[in-house]
Amino acid sequence: MTQAMPARVVLVAGLHGAARTTAVDRLLHADPRAIAIHHDLSRIGEGEVQRVTRDRWGEIDRTRVDLVHACVSCTLREDLVPLLCELAERGEYSSYIVEAWDGVEPRPIAEALTGTVVNRRPVTRWLHLAAVITAVSADRLVADLSTKDDMVDRGLAVAEEDDRTVAEVLAEQIEYPTALALHGGGRDPQVGAQCTAVLTQLNPAAAVVPTEKDALHALTGGGFDPVAAAARMDPAAAQPPERCEMGEVRTVTWRRSRPLHPARLHAALDDVVGVSLRSRGRFWLASHPDTLLVWDAAGSSLAMQPAGPWLAALPDAAWDLVPEHRKAAATLDWAPECGDRCQCISFTGVGLDTDRLVEVLDSCLLTEEEVADATLTFDRADDPFAELLDTAS
């Protein structure tokens, strides 16, 4: 029987290879006419990529892929997408499971599978992205979200200049999809419950299911919208819940409408970053009053970078150029005195002392007297973040 187009595609990602492979095996078992395609990037630094195709009974084919440039984007553009379109044309299989490599985040793959143009036609003529799933191991989740290891330390770097941390990659793999597969959570119910709480609080939009059961396949019958996923992850617009507590796993979102004092924030970073597994959001620094700054921390690693102006700093005519989800968030954040300028950073951790954390962050804000002082200014010498943020601009 020839399968009609567009063909169903399911993307399975995850840093934890055993968990990811188990999830793929379960999907193959649930659909005997499906095949899985995996690009082995373990030797991409030497210019070698191996494409492995398998079905529920085992390996079908293993092919060395020769690329102009051995990189993830080239693998997607030059091999994966054309291959899937060709297979969809043949119609021999009911669905295609794309198993990502350990250190590859699902977002670029999902966007390639939905936004690429093939022979001057949209790839959606051939392919329908039904689901994006990230699989994680219960016995490694918390440890890898808190580790200081870089990807290169684990031999998982996908490019010479890959300076990402393990915690950073894992966090982004968890936060993007709408389905999360937890492997090994049933071996220790307490650990399983803790991992489920971490996953649920890091990505409230995702369903969390065990890899060991057929419930995973039930999540592959719909569709995945990369545009909506990107908007949900946009730190300039995210509206996380104020508080959540599930056992020892706690999330708190710190919201304030006064700017942060740069020197006081810098002095408090050790007391803010290391206490949680993950923190992210947007913040307002008194020394950069018109610039929306992004806060992105995983484990003990913190990245700060400018993300353009606050909407309150834009002329009214420029609002027509702003994405709708950003305007909606600005409307929710709006205050008469400062517009959409605000502090909105969400922290998630195990055993997190949320009251103490909020107290430390509040101590970094400008006081009411400082806010009222029209003569208060910040020179570069007074701003420990000046060089970092000016370089990133």
Image: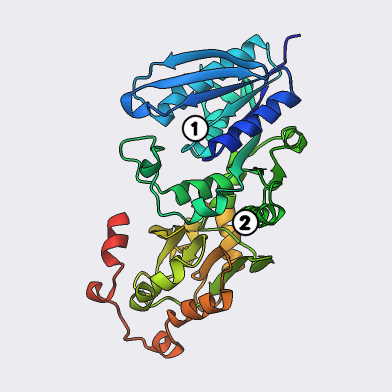
Q: Residue 198 carries which label?
A: 2
Judged left or right of residue 237, residue 64 is left
> Residue 98 sits in which quadrant?
top right
The location of residue 48, given as percent across then percent down, is 37, 21
Q: Which mark is residue 101?
A: 1
At a point 50% along the width and 40% down the height, the residue shown is 105
Q: How crowded is mark 2: few (under 14 residues within 10 Å), some or many (20 or more)?
A: many
The location of residue 116, given as percent across then percent down, is 52, 27
Q: Which mark is residue 264?
A: none
At a point 30% along the width and 80% down the height, the residue shown is 377
387, above or below 379, in the image:
above
Q: Residue furthest front?
A: 187
For the residue labelled by badge 1, is the local secondary structure a helix, a strand or a loop? loop
Q: In which quarter of the image is the N terminus?
A: top right
Q: Nearest the camera: 59 or 109?
A: 59
85, above or below 390, in the image:
above
